[in-house]
Structures are given as C-alpha cells and as structure tokens.
Amino acid sequence: TACAAAAGGFRAGPALAALIGALALQVAANYINDVADYEQGTDTAGRLGPTRATAAGWLTPRQMWAGVAATIGVAALAGLYLTWVAGWPVLAVGAASMLAAFAYSAGPFPLTKLGMGEPFVMVFFGFVATCGTAWVQALVVPAAAWWGGFVCGALSIAILVVNNTRDHATDRAAGRRTLPARLGKRAGVIELAAFLVLAHAATIGAVLSRAVGAWVLGALVTAPLGVLLVRRVATCDDGPTLNRELARAGQLLLLHSLLWSVGVLA
C-alpha cells in the first residue's frame, strides 16, 4: 500500500479488501495445516510447537474443515470485489492463492513434505502480497513493490526456517524434506542467516537502484535483531524457547516492513 501511495495510486477500498483477503487466506492455510497434519499423523507427542486445535481435541476435523471453508469464502468475496475494481488478473492470482493454501499442507503432494516451503512463501507472502496489493490500487506495480516483495518474502522465509529448525527431528521422522530435516539443525541456522542477510541486502539494493529513497535505509535498524535471532536459534534446542524465537522472527518482519513503508512514504 505504501508503494501504491508513493506512486499516487492509494485507494482505501481495494487496500482494505486486499488486507482482508490476505488475512483470510493466511488463516485458511493455518487451519488446513492444523487439520492436515492431524489426519496425516504428523502431529505426535514429540511436537515442540504450539498446541494444535485438532490434535488437542479442541475441534473435530469436520469443524476445522468448516472453518477452512468459511475463511476461503471470505477471501473469495474480497477477491471478487478486487476483480471488479482491478480486472481479471486478480481472479487468476486469487484462484492460485487459494489452491496454494490447500497444496501447502494437504493433497497428494503437500509442499511441506516436498521441502518446497521457501519458494511458496517467497511467491505468495512476498511478491503476490506486496505487488498484488499495489496493483489493485494503482493498476501498476512500481519497482519499489518488487523490491518490497522480495524483502517481505525473505523475512517470511526466515520465520518458516525458525519453525523448520525447531521441528527438524520430528519432521525427519514424518518424512518431510525441509532443509533442516535433511541436513540437520546447522543447515537451518545457516539458511536463517542467509535469508536475513538477503532481506537487508535487498533493502540496500532498492535504494541503490533508486526504486525507493534513502529513508528506506532506516529499516536496517533491524539487522542487530537478526543477528540475535540467529545466535539464539543456534544455541537453544528446547521447544518453548524456540517458540519465542519464532515470535521474534515475526516481530522482526513487522518492524522491518513498517520502517520500509515509512521510508517509502517519506
């Protein structure tokens, strides 16, 4: 939205609809992940992550799938409105996003088991989220949105990598092919550091390419937080501590994105 506004194309209605649609798809993907892991027998007593609703018996699989249908319905309504204001490309992207939300954890070839989480996150949490939101408002995708999409995607992958590093032992037992599951925790820590470096390097690249102004460099204040995150993930193994680091990775994404947006608008 900041990129669209900087290009003179801010529109509150499409911006709000894009936010609602994105949040609904995120919730749907989480619900699908919850119930699919339960039905596939992936959630075991050795799980280190937060309690899952289906595995804990709080909700039945049928109730969880009903929640999936409801949230997908909300996303579809937002998508129809955005198609009306921004054209048929939104319909195609929205359909692909809904399919991806399902394919991430469920279906015959879930992306989580194939070790394809990183490209999925880069595409849908990075470029689709950022460039798509700019498009439905400005009807163009500024260069700043492409840079911002990469930055958001890389930082979102960092969250995924913390999750995969925490779960590397149980994921290996469940047959998942994430990088930490295949190569061990050290590989996960290296991957985490790499994507944090890429995100901050892309912020510098966006300024050097003149896609955004120098104020965006203010987002680099999150770099020390990234260093601390890598250090803590590398040195701890217990679930509750790594869950806190997962939350900190999310906070880093939020802070960097907010500072990036402020810099774009400055």
Image: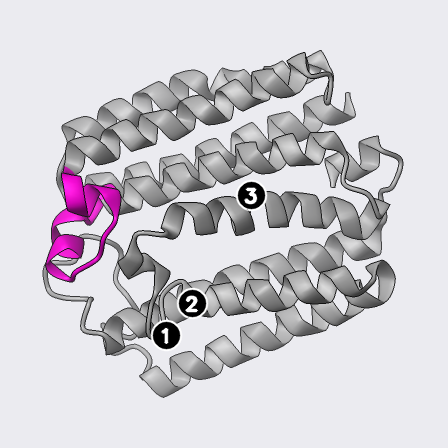
Residue lying furthest right:
8
Q: Are marks 3 and 2 in contact (CB under 8 Å)?
A: no
Residue under the image location 40 percent in, 16 percent down = 224
Give coordinates of residue 233: x percent, y percent.
23, 31
Pointer 1 residue:
107
**Side (left or right) of 186 relative to 197:** left
User: From the viewer's perspective, is the residue at label 3 or at label 1 nearer?
Assistant: 1
Position of 57 relative to 9 (above/below): below
CA separation in Å, label 3 and label 1: 23 Å
Residue under the image location 42 percent in, 67 percent down = 103
Q: Nearer the viewer, residue 263 or 200?
A: 200
| Residue 239 appears in the picture as rendered | no
Position of 8 relative to 36 (above/below): above
Q: Which mark is residue 103?
A: 2
Q: Which residues are magenta?
A: 165-184
Pointer 3 residue:
126
Three-letter amino acid code at the position of disc 2: Ala
**Side (left or right) of 147 relative to 68:** right
Dot 2: few (<14), some (14–19), or many (≥20) neighbours within 10 Å? some
Give coordinates of residue 128: x percent, y percent.
62, 50
Three-letter amino acid code at the position of disc 1: Gly
Q: Secondary structure at mark 3?
A: helix
**Side (left or right) of 126 relative to 237:** right
Q: Quadrant location of residue 89?
A: bottom right
Of the 4 image quadrants, the one containing the C terminus is: top right
Q: Nearer the viewer, residue 119 or 53?
A: 119
Give coordinates of residue 87: x percent, y percent.
83, 62
Magenta span includes 212 = no
